[in-house]
Amino acid sequence: MYTAYVLTNEAREKLAEKFPPKYEKFVGHHVTVQFGVPAGTEAPDPAIVRVIGRADSGDGLEALVVSVDGTQERPDGKTYHVTWSLDPGKYKPVDSNNLVSSARFALSMPITVETVPQVLS
């Protein structure tokens, strides 16, 4: 289980217009906050979530880098992001963690997006 900020349908559509998915599988679902939480964990508090950049491996994986209440760093030290699109023959959504930590990303003007705090499994 994990806690996350799930993009609303409206936010996902707005971002897809601004950042058309580049690869075969469009993900664009959520921003992970904390992975491996126990059953009964509460959803995170509502937050201001802003897209601040885009990272692209160039060969099948792209992610949108985000800030949550002004910080890019998750509680586990990783970078907040939304896996945006991928080539499923080469990548899985979890691979976005390495992409956003090791790759430079193109900065953009911050775009505030609506999300719903949730606990997912």
Image: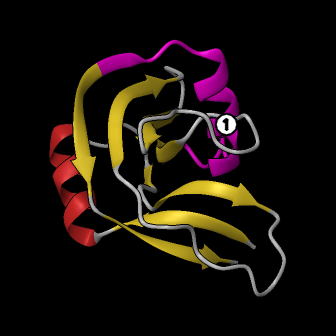
Locate the C terminus and report the quarter of the image it occupies.
bottom right
Q: Is residue 77 left or right of residue 84?
A: right
Which residue shows up at 65% across the image and 45% down it? 89
Closer to us: 73 or 52: 73
- Looking at the picture, how far across and down is residue 109, in whole percent? 20, 25
Q: Secondary structure at mark 1?
A: helix
The image quadrant of residue 50 is top left
Displayed quadrant of residue 80 = top right
Q: Name which residue lies at 47% across and 37% down.
A: 63
Measuring from the top left, give residue 59's x and y in whole percent: 54, 24
Question: What's drawn in magenta, residue-wise?
Answer: 87-107
Q: Position of residue 81 (x, y in %)?
A: 51, 41
Side (left or right) of 42 relative to 77: left
Q: Name the residue at the bottom extreme.
A: 40
Residue 110 is situated, as x and y percent measured from the top left of the image, at: 25, 32
Identify which amino acid the numbered label 1 is placed on: Asn
Q: Is residue 95 magenta?
A: yes
Position of the N terminus, as image quadrant, is bottom right
Most distant residue in the top direction: 104
Q: Is residue 21 magenta?
A: no
Seen at 43% across and 38% down, the residue is: 66
The residue where tag 1 is placed is: 97
Query: Residue at horizontal 60%, vertical 49%?
Result: 88
